[in-house]
Image: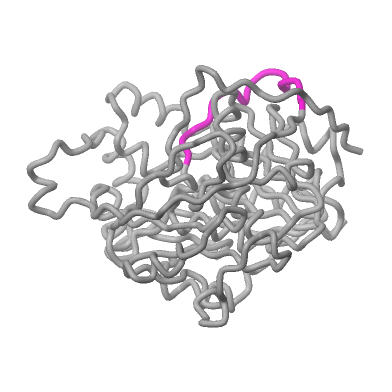
C-alpha cells in the first residue's frame, strides 16, 4: 500500500527552469549508488490556465547559414568509439544515422499539445504552418480540439513538420499552463506501447524531465501516476514540468518521489498495473557533443556499468507491477548492450516474465514517420535517425509479468 505524505507548496525561488527541447532524451543520470534516497510525495499547486498566442516557428539555419555560425564541437573520442561499435552492430544503417546525429541543424521537433491548456486556434495555426499529425487517429477532420473542462477526452495529439522547424519555447509562469511541449517524436513510442487506460495505477520509474509523464496524461487519466527520479536537480526539473502543464484538479492523483528506482520494486511490490522504465543510458545525441575530451572519456568508462544498472531497474519494475501487468523498457541509445542484451538477461534471469510484441498496427502507422532498424536478436524496436526522418534513437521493448 502506498503512503501518501503531502507537503506544503514548494518554493521555486532560485530554481532555474531548463528548456523542454528534446525532452525525451537524457544523459547518464548520477546518484544511483548507495542507499535509497528517502521517499516523499509532493502535492503540486497552481491556478487555471490562461491563453497565449502561438507565434510562428523559427526555421533551423540553412546549410549556408550553418557554415557561418559557430557549430557544436564533436567529441572525436566518443565518435571513434561509436564508429567502431555501431558499424559492427548496425552496418550500413549506422552511416545514415551518423550523418543525422552529427548535424543538429537538421533535427526535427515534435509538438505535443497539452489538452489541459486553452488550445483554441492552436491546432489550426500549426496546420497552416505545415504541421501534421504524427498519429493517424488524430489527423481526422472529426478530431477537433475540445477543452479539458468539457469532460470529453481527446486523444494524444503530437504534430510534426517535414522540415527542422522549431516553435519558440514557452516560458514557465506560475498559474499558467503551457500549450505545448517540444520533444523528439520518437520518445512517444514507449508511451504508446504502454497503452495506459483510465483508472490504471502507473509508475514512471525514471521520470525526469517529465515529457513521458506528460504524454501519459495526454493519453489517459490514470487512477494514480507515480513519477520517480533519483537525481535531485532532475527531480526539481520534473516538478517544474508537471507544475507547468498539469491542472490542480489532477494533481492529487500524481505522486512525485526522489528515490533510487532499484528500491521501489522491493518496497512497493505488485502495486502497479503498468510501469515505464525510461532507463538512464548513454545518450548518443548528447555524448557526441561532450564539452571536453576528458568528459567523453569519463562517460565511455562509465558506459560499461550501465547495462547492470539498467537490468536492476528493469527487475525492480517487474517486481513493482502486478501479475498480468505490463512493463515497457526504453532508452535513447543505439547500443545493443543497453537494449536487446538487457532484455535477454532479464528474460533469462527473471522467472515469470514474457516478451510482448508491439501491435503491428502501431508500428505500421509509425513507419510512415520513423525508420526502424533490423535488430538482431529481434527483441524490441529501435528507431534510427535518417535524413528527413530525424527521430530517434529510441529503443522500446514491452514485457509482461505472468506470475
Q: Quick check: is 30 in the magenta stretch?
A: yes
The N terminus, quarter of image? top right
The x, y position of residue 222, in whole percent, is 76, 54
Q: Residue at x 35, y 52 (%)?
A: 167
Magenta span has 34? yes
377 up-or-down from 261: above or below = below
Q: Position of residue 283 (x, y in %)?
A: 43, 41
222 sits left or right of 345 in the view: right
Residue stretch in magenta: 26-40
Could you tell whether 384 is left or right of 40 in the image? left
Whether residue 87 can be seen here: no
Tell me the chief SS of the magenta region: loop
| Residue at the (65%, 54%) spot, across then down | 216
Can residue 329 be spotted in the picture?
yes
- List x then y, in percent, for residue 104: 27, 48
Residue at 57% over, 76% down: 143
Task: Tell me which corner region of the image, top left, top right, bottom left or bottom right, holds residue 340.
Answer: bottom right
Residue nearer the viewer, 25 or 378: 25
Which residue is at 68% across, 63% downward? 195
Amino acid at each position: 500500500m502506498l503512503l501518501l505524505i503531502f507537503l506544503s507548496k514548494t518554493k521555486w525561488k532560485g530554481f532555474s527552469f531548463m528548456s523542454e527541447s528534446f525532452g525525451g532524451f537524457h544523459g547518464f543520470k548520477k546518484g544511483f549508488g548507495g542507499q535509497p534516497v528517502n521517499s516523499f510525495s509532493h502535492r503540486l499547486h497552481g491556478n487555471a490556465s490562461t491563453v497565449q498566442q502561438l507565434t510562428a516557428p523559427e526555421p533551423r539555419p540553412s546549410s549556408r547559414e550553418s557554415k557561418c555560425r559557430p557549430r557544436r564541437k564533436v567529441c572525436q573520442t566518443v565518435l571513434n568509439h561509436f564508429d567502431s561499435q555501431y558499424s559492427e552492430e548496425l552496418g550500413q544503417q549506422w552511416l545514415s544515422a551518423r550523418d543525422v546525429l552529427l548535424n543538429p541543424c537538421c533535427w526535427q521537433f515534435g509538438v505535443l499539445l497539452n489538452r489541459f491548456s486553452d488550445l483554441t486556434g492552436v491546432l489550426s495555426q500549426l496546420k497552416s504552418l505545415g504541421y501534421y499529425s504524427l498519429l493517424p487517429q488524430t489527423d481526422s477532420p472529426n478530431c477537433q480540439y475540445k477543452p479539458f473542462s468539457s469532460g470529453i477526452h481527446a486523444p494524444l495529439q503530437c504534430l510534426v513538420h517535414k522540415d527542422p522547424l522549431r516553435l519558440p519555447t514557452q516560458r514557465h509562469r506560475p498559474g499558467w499552463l503551457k500549450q505545448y511541449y517540444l520533444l523528439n517524436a520518437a520518445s512517444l513510442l514507449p508511451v504508446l506501447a504502454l497503452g495506459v487506460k483510465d483508472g490504471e495505477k502507473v509508475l514512471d520509474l525514471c521520470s525526469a524531465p517529465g515529457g513521458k509523464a506528460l504524454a501519459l496524461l495526454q493519453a489517459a487519466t490514470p487512477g494514480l501516476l507515480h513519477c520517480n527520479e533519483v537525481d535531485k536537480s532532475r527531480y526539481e526539473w520534473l516538478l517544474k514540468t508537471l507544475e507547468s502543464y498539469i491542472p490542480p484538479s489532477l494533481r492529487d492523483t500524481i505522486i512525485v518521489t526522489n528515490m533510487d528506482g532499484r528500491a521501489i520494486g522491493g518496497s512497493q511490490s505488485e502495486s502497479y498495473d503498468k510501469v515505464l522504465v525510461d532507463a538512464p543510458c548513454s545518450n548518443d545525441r548528447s555524448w557526441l557533443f561532450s564539452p571536453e575530451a576528458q568528459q567523453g572519456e569519463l562517460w565511455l568508462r562509465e558506459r560499461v556499468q550501465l547495462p547492470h544498472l539498467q537490468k536492476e531497474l528493469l527487475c525492480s519494475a517487474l517486481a513493482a507491477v502486478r501479475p498480468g501487468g505490463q512493463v515497457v523498457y526504453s532508452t535513447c541509445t543505439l547500443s545493443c548492450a543497453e537494449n536487446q542484451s538487457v532484455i535477454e538477461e532479464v528474460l533469462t534471469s527473471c522467472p515469470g516474465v514474457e516478451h510482448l510484441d508491439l501491435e503491428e498496427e502501431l508500428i505500421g502507422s509509425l513507419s510512415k514517420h520513423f525508420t526502424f532498424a533490423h535488430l538482431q536478436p529481434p527483441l524490441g524496436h529501435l528507431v534510427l535517425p535518417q535524413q528527413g526522418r530525424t527521430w530517434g534513437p529510441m529503443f522500446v521493448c514491452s514485457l509482461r509479468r505472468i506470475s
